[in-house]
Image: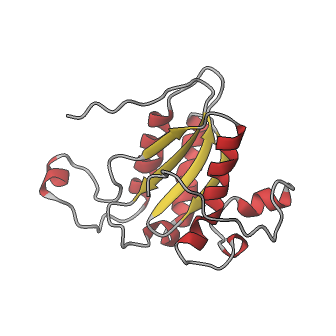
């Protein structure tokens, strides 16, 4: 079994990419209300700050900051995925391995995470979230994608409504 190394920094900010197993599915936007409910429930049990999120049909990107003294983001993702999986009908195809393990066939087991080292890194990853629907040719401008905290950040004055972004180079777990 692979030994994945995770950077666990109490109170740290992280960027995540979390994918559906079936990358052709649009489950996340079809069931966005259940996904939001899953995030809220996990957040009540194990608080975190949602700095940015964009939910696309088959994957999501998020920037999350953990509370001081807490570095357990794997627990939070396990809860979010579990809650979501319990809220939607059990109709997806599953491999023999997943059936034997009594696992759903919704999520990829792993996810991409990146510890955000400084303010520049943080901003770069928030902007990546907001530009992602444009990158995937789902909309022309970030403001046109409704499943994003971009709109919250516009209301709070952190982003301007006409921000059109740019594609950011780097590794983002796509």
Q: Position of residue 171 (x, y in %)?
A: 48, 51
Corner quadrant of residue 119: top right
Give the answer, above or below, for where 12 lies relative to 109: above
Q: In the image as oriented, which residue stretches furthest toward the top?
A: 69
Task: Locate the C terminus and report the quarter of the image it occupies.
Answer: bottom left
The residue lying toward the viewer, choosing from 64 and 28, is 64
Asked which colour scheme the image uses, the reply is secondary structure
The residue lying toward the viewer, choosing from 103 and 110, is 110
Left or right: where 7 falls relative to 158 = left
Q: Residue at x 56, y 70 (%)?
A: 135
Q: Position of residue 156 (x, y in %)?
A: 85, 54
Q: In the image as oriented, which residue stretches furthest toward the front?
A: 169
Q: How many marks?
A: 0
Q: Residue at x 66, y 65 (%)?
A: 166
Q: Position of residue 116 (x, y in %)?
A: 60, 37
The residue lying toward the viewer, choosing from 146 and 134, is 134
Q: Position of residue 80 (x, y in %)?
A: 48, 47
Task: Locate the N terminus and report the quarter of the image it occupies.
Answer: top left
Q: Residue at x 31, y 63 (%)?
A: 90
Q: Residue at x 55, y 56 (%)?
A: 169
The residue lying toward the viewer, choosing from 46 and 7, is 7
Give the answer, above or below, for where 119 lies relative to 143: above
């Amino acid at each position: 079994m692979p030994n994945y190394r995770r950077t666990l920094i109490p109170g740290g900010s992280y960027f995540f990419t979390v994918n559906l197993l079936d990358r052709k599915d649009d489950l996340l936007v079809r069931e966005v209300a259940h996904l939001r409910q899953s995030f809220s429930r996990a957040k009540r049990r194990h608080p975190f700050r949602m700095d940015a999120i964009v939910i696309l049909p088959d994957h999501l990107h998020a920037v999350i900051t953990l509370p001081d003294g807490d570095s357990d983001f794997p627990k939070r993702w396990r809860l979010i995925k579990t809650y979501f999986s319990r809220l939607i009908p059990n109709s997806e195809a599953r491999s023999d391995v997943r059936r034997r393990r009594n696992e759903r066939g919704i999520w990829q087991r792993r996810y991409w995470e990146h510890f955000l080292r400084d303010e520049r890194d943080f901003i770069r990853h928030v902007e990546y979230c907001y530009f992602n629907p444009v990158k995937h040719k789902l909309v022309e401008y970030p403001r046109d994608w409704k499943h994003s905290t971009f709109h919250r950040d516009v209301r709070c004055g952190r982003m301007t409504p006409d921000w059109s972004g740019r594609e950011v180079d780097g590794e983002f777990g796509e």
